[in-house]
Amino acid sequence: MFLAQWREIVRSYVEERLFLFILVGLLFTMGIVFGTLSAKSLGEGQKTELLHYLQLFFQGMKQEVQPVTDPALAKEAIFNHLKTVFFFVILGISVIGVPLILFLTFAKGYILGFTIGFILQQLAGKGFLFAVTSVFPHYAFFIPALLTAGVANIDFAGILLKSRFGKGNYRMAAELWQCLGINGIAILVLMLSGIIEGFVSPLFIYWVARIF
């Protein structure tokens, strides 16, 4: 019963803001595309240098006698995620910061696209396996949480703007708590993403590094 109600709430929220989800998702996807293209357009010297660092990383992983989890990496990832959501909230409340939310979403996609694009370009099939095992586990949680936080704060900025011009009758306290609640859920999911990045992904990377 509770799960059915929860699914209905989520479905209703997404349907009412479908345009925003499409917009934010499209910008994130565009970031991935541009990042991939940027990786392909790197100069030979840059490619060689980055590939050298990547090979050093694999050599270091091979020398480990057992998988090494990284609490520091998890803490850093969680801290960065918290900063991102905090900036989203501040930018949303400011209203004029909405374009920056869109830009940050694009930038996150660009970083992901560049990383995956370079790995696939240089390592081909092995690169695909490495990208799937090292990136997918935590990004499977990161992407939906990031996009949802972006939509929540853009939506709240729109409500503030409409309210200032007298368009619509909104209960601002309720809208604010809803926005903060969604951001809180996004933070929890992003924290899970950070934990996976620090404690689960290294296990996959350790075993995949053996084939390089």
Image: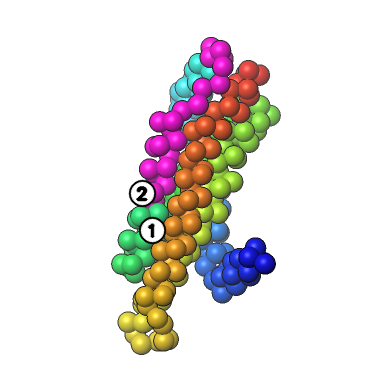
Q: Is residue 104 above or below residue 74?
A: below
The residue closer to the viewer here, 188 or 169, is: 188
User: In the rendering, which numbered label is found on residue 83?
Assistant: 2
The image quadrant where one finds the C terminus is top right
Cα separation, mark 1 vs mark 2, equals 9 Å
Majority secondary structure of the magenta segment? helix
The residue positioned 42% from the left and 42% from the top of the image is: 78
Q: Is residue 163 above or below residue 148?
A: below
Q: Is residue 96 left or right of residue 138?
A: left
- Residue type at mark 1 is Phe
Which picture quadrant has residue 37?
top right
1 and 2 marks in contact (CB < 8 Å):
no
Crowding at dot 1, Cα within 10 Å, few <14 / some 14-19 / many 20+, comes out as: many
Could you tell me residue 173's position as x and y percent?
37, 75
Crowding at dot 2, Cα within 10 Å, few <14 / some 14-19 / many 20+, comes out as: few
The image quadrant where one finds the N terminus is bottom right
Identify residue for label 1.
88
Q: Which residues are magenta?
A: 62-84
